[in-house]
Amino acid sequence: MKINGLLASLMLFCSTALASGFGLDSLRSGDIAAMQTPAPSGPASTASATKEWTIIALINGKNSLSDAALQDLNEMETVGSTPAMDIVAEVGTVTEKEGQPAVYSVKRYHVAKDGDTSKVSSVPVTELKKTDMGSWEHFAGFVKWAKAKYPAKRYLVVVWNHGSGWKSSGKPLEPVPAAASRGISYDDETSNHITALEMARALSAAGGADLLASDACLMQELATNYEIRKYAGVIVGSEETEPNEGQDYSRFLTALAARPAASAEEAARMYVAAYNDYYRATRNDTTISAVRAASFDGLAAKVTALADAMLADGDMTFARDSRRKTLKFDDSDARDLGHFARVVSEDAKSPAVRAAARELYSYLKDEVVIVSAFTSRPPAAYPPGYKTAPGEPASARDFSNATGLAAYIPVVYLPEYNYDALSFAKASSWTELIKRMKSAQSDADYWDDFPDD
């Protein structure tokens, strides 16, 4: 989900402020009942289903998140399945004792209501033998099984684990020699995970989802979402890393259980509000947003128009400087797309570039992003004499420029990441722009990305 061992030391802690500018001025989970938003044009479920929603959660704790997996299952039990809503979870865990082999377990639950958060009380529907939760085929099979056993009018599919956007660690993005660095749903037992291209295959095979939530780090990204745009109505995720706790499922499911007839967009707003409310009470820096999958073909056209205009203008030094001004995330190759467009629209000398950037920003704001929120406090907001807690960085992150969707804008384009294999790269001239930007990069760009090196 969540921050892996190497990233954990980089997690920043802070108080919070809610994003504004993308329709988020005072979002709270309690406000959802007053919201009326149109249903997205996502995949429709059978109208004859007796329940309104089935939540299908792949909770892969076969890694460093095993304890957090059980914690979130316990959160789901505080609400449990209802006459209008089923909650189904496949939960992987690992037990490790010094000097003994790790023992892995995978169980499927129809989650029942239980007020005891100290233990899991739901009885497993089935316990699986050695199971590869990093296999897209297995994931697709689980979703199909859940849909068949617990049919509903709408489906929310949750992928819970470590994640890092389109990048793929330890295996090629496609069957080519190139291998990049990250993906989602890491299974330590099998050393496998699901790549962005495999996620699209899995969702296609499983019949899609009305709402797809990645309870994982760095997943709300342009190319990642473009890959799955045909197989989800609404996509929820974080541009930034997530704390290990991830979503507050008690808070979210309470809201959904109170309004089970909610559309996918309404449920997505509930998800964003629950997450944001939970971290408002902590000092964690977080982002969370919901986007319309059907808007991504139009978004690709707007991104291409901006890339074409900047390529025609030819000022790659300006492109580089715009990148450096743009909000970056824990993966410094990921920058906020809306902020980049706004920076370019304000600073470009070329009228054509300014116009294309404004159109991209407006399209993101009006057509793509349903809701976006953040929790953070800039360093200037610390009270006089504030002393950081042990392990807390001296300055916090300011996510006030987060608009809800990240994009790949690297300091140096690396062919071995195989970005060209992604559908978005094939559909857009964005790749040509970020390749050309390499010629204008300097040592200062490197130090901007890696100030501690």
Image (tube, rainbow, N blue to C red):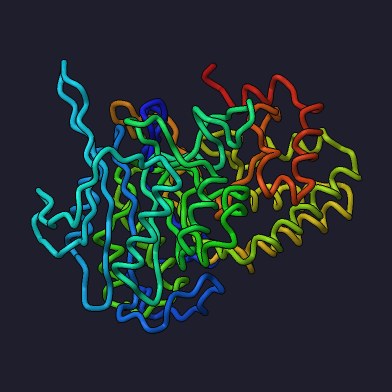
Quarter placement of the C terminus: top right
- Foreground of the two, 36 or 229: 229
Q: Quadrant of residue 189?
A: top left
Q: Residue furthest bottom?
A: 48
From this view, report whether residue 405 is shown above or below residue 78.
above
Q: Residue furthest front?
A: 129
Counting from the top left corner in percent of width and height, residue 64 is at 30, 32
| Residue in view at x 16 percent, y 64 percent | 112
Counting from the top left corner in percent of width and height, residue 450 is at 57, 23
Horizontal placement of 61 versus 122: left or right? right
Quarter placement of the N terminus: top left
| Residue in view at x 22 percent, y 52 percent | 73
| Residue in view at x 87 percent, y 47 percent | 349
From this view, report whether residue 398 is shown above or below residue 153.
above
- Foreground of the two, 34 or 19: 34
- Foreground of the two, 263 or 99: 99
Visible residue check, residue 383: no
Horizontal placement of 374 versus 63: left or right? right
